[in-house]
Image (cartoon, helix red, strand yellow):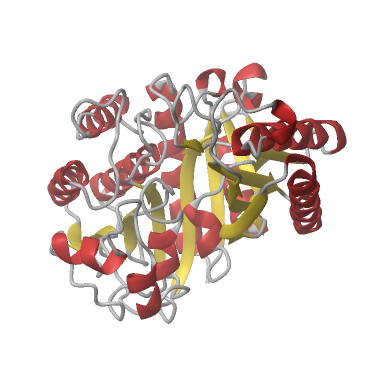
Amino acid sequence: MADRFRIQNNLETLRDFSAPGEEGTTRLSYTPAYLQAVDYLKKEMEAAGLRTWEDGVGNVYGELKGTDETAPVILSGSHLDTVRCSGYFDGQAGIVCALEAARMLKESGKPLRSSFQVLATIMEEGARFPNLTGSRYIAGENGEAQLDTLRDQDGVTLREAIRQCGFSGNLEMTCRKADSIKAFLELHLEQGIRLESTHTDLGIVETIYGCRWFTVAVNGATSHPSTPMNLRKDAGIAACTLISELAALVEEHYPNRATVTFGKFENHPNEINAVPGRTVFSVDFRSGKPEILNELEALLKEKLKAMESRFRVKTELTLYSDVPPTPCCAEFSKILEEQAAALHFSTLRMDSGAGHDAMIFAKHWPAAMIFVPSHNGLTHCPKEWTDYGNLAKGADVLCAAIRQIDKLD
């Protein structure tokens, strides 16, 4: 069975590889804190008997060799990067539980036919470069062009960030599209309250919500606060009005079917005694139905036109990321469910409102996900939490499912 104390030690050590002066854990891709976490993770993998390497863009692998080199590979893991001021379970819990499954498989003395690879992806979060970029390179969806066109907020290109960290940038060794991969399994926090509120041990994910991200720039005119209200071209008020109206419409017309989030908001010149002349904010739509995402995009464009006329401003709309809803592999989801039942763990079939690396891989190889309870549904913040016993249960199910998948022809 999984050792919850090994899991705890790994997670609490990774927690402390963080940018200085930040609340919680801040580990953006290609930063010193990130590279320190990679070094630690590779040492833990090697101590467990795994062969380790990094691909051209910095995704990390640890391999437990199988007995049949021609057999398709089984992958499990999640992402090592975080958003700013995050907790220390999102992403890395999936890596650590996959590593714990590898330890159990190794310690059993009963090798798999397939090789089992623990995977730690880079750039899953959109905190520095666009989200899911690491998995997109593994799946062959990104190429050389994106190395030069993707930039962080300081203007550093992805190619420059990769070279600064000493990674090769070799995309041939990064892309796994032509490889024979049997399954990708990802464990993750639920990022909601259904499991905790129903006292359910584990969730089996059926569909991963799609997400469509936009950046909206509202261009008005900076002026003095003495400017009459009816003469202003106030970008900030225009943006706030749109945000309020759009949030109310999504809540009213798409309950439990879609969400909208406005995570970034910047006023310019951002002075207490100046009417904002430019406001830039983000829009994050999520849904399990592609037609709903299309409806929400159309609604956003309609609201932007109305805002231009009402507030005497001009707007710019930029699509930042577009990932469609993704169904998980029914066969492997059933195996996860069956192995949980065999271990006397309760399960709940559910959808994921958050995006994950699995949604990229599922387009190319069979993928399935298992959720562990998230305390109060808090995530992407220092109060993010799940009990280490929950993670041990998840690791046990992962290990058992890997054994079953390995037996399949």
Residue 328 can be seen, yes or no: no
Give left or right: position of 63 versus 244: left
Residue 47: image location, x then y, percent: 13, 46
- x and y percentages locating residue 73 in the rendered image: 39, 68
How far across and how far down the image is residue 138, in percent? 39, 69
The image quadrant that residue 406 belongs to is: bottom left
Measured as percent of width and height from the top left, residue 409 is found at 52, 72
Describe residue 176's horizontal placement relative to residue 314 as left or right: left
**Closer to us: 93 or 201:** 93
Image position of 177 with respect to 306: above or below: below
What residue do we see at 75% from left, 54% from top?
Answer: 301
Could one spot residue 183 in this view of the protein? yes
Is residue 188 depicted above or below 7 in this figure? below
Looking at the image, which residue is at 82% across and 35% down?
249
Residue at the spot 30% in from the left edge and 81% down from the top edge:
172
Q: Quadrant of the N terminus?
A: top left
Closer to us: 101 or 382 = 382
Residue 377 against residue 141 in the figure, above or below: above
**Total marks in image:** 0
Which is more toward the observer, 224 or 256?
Answer: 224
Q: Residue at point 24% right, 77% down? A: 170
